Amino acid sequence: MNVAPPPWWVRRFVLAPAMVAIAVLLAPTSILLVLLALAVVSWALPGRLRAPRMAWMTVFYILWEATALLGFFGIWVASGFGYAMDRKAFRSVNLRFAAWMVKVLFWQVRWTLRLRITIDADEIRGLDGVPAVVVSRHAGPGDSFVLVDALLNVARREPRIVLKDTLRWDPAIDTLLSRIPAEFVVPHSRRAADDPGGSEAVGDLARTMSDDSALLLFPEGGNVTPRRRTARIAALQDAGQSDLAAMAAAMPHVMAPHVGGFLAALDACPRAGVVVVAHTGLEKLVTFGDIWRELPMDKHIVMKGWSTAPGVLPVGADDRGTWLFSEWARVDGWIDATTAELEREKTDPRRRTSRRVRAAQRG
């Protein structure tokens, strides 16, 4: 969806109360709805209880959203109706409440969709004491939420995010991301001349990072598709960057990264280290049709990070761009090895704790 979100007063005084009202009306009948779906439609549809699972996730998400909105409203009231919201104590309360809500959401998602998530966060913890610029591949609609959960509840970092303004249509996400450092970027098709671009928004967020901050970037800019991947390689060729184009062509699982936001983050916060994140398990979940066909997913999502300290990073823009491409090649190789191991795991569940999985996670 690329429809501009309504003004803030519509989002706060119309959309948010409407979501809470829907949840209040839905709560008494939510269990009955799921039982009815189990009894009536699951037998007639292919797959294993797809309709009840989707119905329950829809009901749960509405209830979750209403709880989040009421919680954030309570924090706002407790802060003196927003007067003390910028103070450290209330920033911490907002962050911890957001972390708890994300944890609850992922607990339910894992249970309903039968997901197993393995996160190796040791490398992120290895940058303790300095800000972190986290650059991740983009695959599927859920990877940003998995990463935010990992940053909040595993790495114990304050996430900073640049994302499309269309996410403001969701009242809870809009409110949550308004309580943590975030920048909403207008897509090119609707961007006015004076609207900030992605690199400018990244620089603004990076400039004020603290030692426990983590700025999350997706340099690919979107989900990997054959058309986008081919177009990115052609763009590098047209720009006279044949070496980078050759590197991109040799990476079948990822797209050539845009380096503008990455360079802007390091320029704005020179003392930041970098964490490169690879993950696999979500590649086939791009559209709602994909999600429907895969229910229940029974997937194993594996996430791995590699950290580089500030003093080890290249200095010049060209060298940093080449370095990011080489790290993306590393991500591509890890995806290839880990995906192969996960395929073998499907045929022999005893391999779930095998040395090969652990070795793949360690990179």
Image (tube, rainbow, N blue to C red):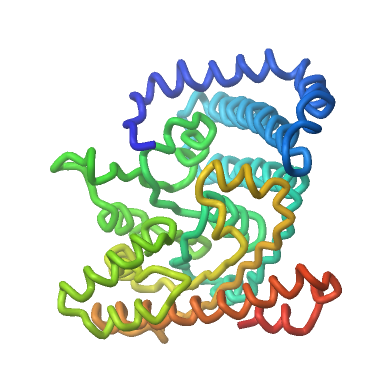
Q: Is residue 143 above or below residue 356?
A: above
Tell me if residue 168 can be seen.
yes
Percent across and percent down for residue 78 are 58, 27
Q: Nearer the viewer, residue 320 or 283?
A: 283
Percent across and percent down for residue 97 are 63, 41
Q: Is residue 64 left or right of residue 214?
A: right
Q: Count the marks: how many?
A: 0
Percent across and percent down for residue 299 are 70, 58
Q: Which residue is at 28% across, 64% downward?
A: 231
Q: Which residue is at 62% across, 59% downward?
A: 150
Q: Is residue 277 left or right of residue 243?
A: right
Percent across and percent down for residue 89 are 57, 43
Q: Is residue 2 above or below residue 235?
A: above
Query: On the rendered image, what quadrant is the C terminus found in?
Result: bottom right
Query: On the rendered image, what quadrant is the N terminus found in?
Result: top left
Q: Which residue is at 24% across, 81% downward?
A: 318
Quadrant in the picture for residue 248: bottom left
Q: Nearer the viewer, residue 93 or 9?
A: 9
Tell me if residue 31 can be seen.
no
Quadrant in the picture for residue 360: bottom right
Q: Which residue is at 29% across, 42% downward?
A: 186
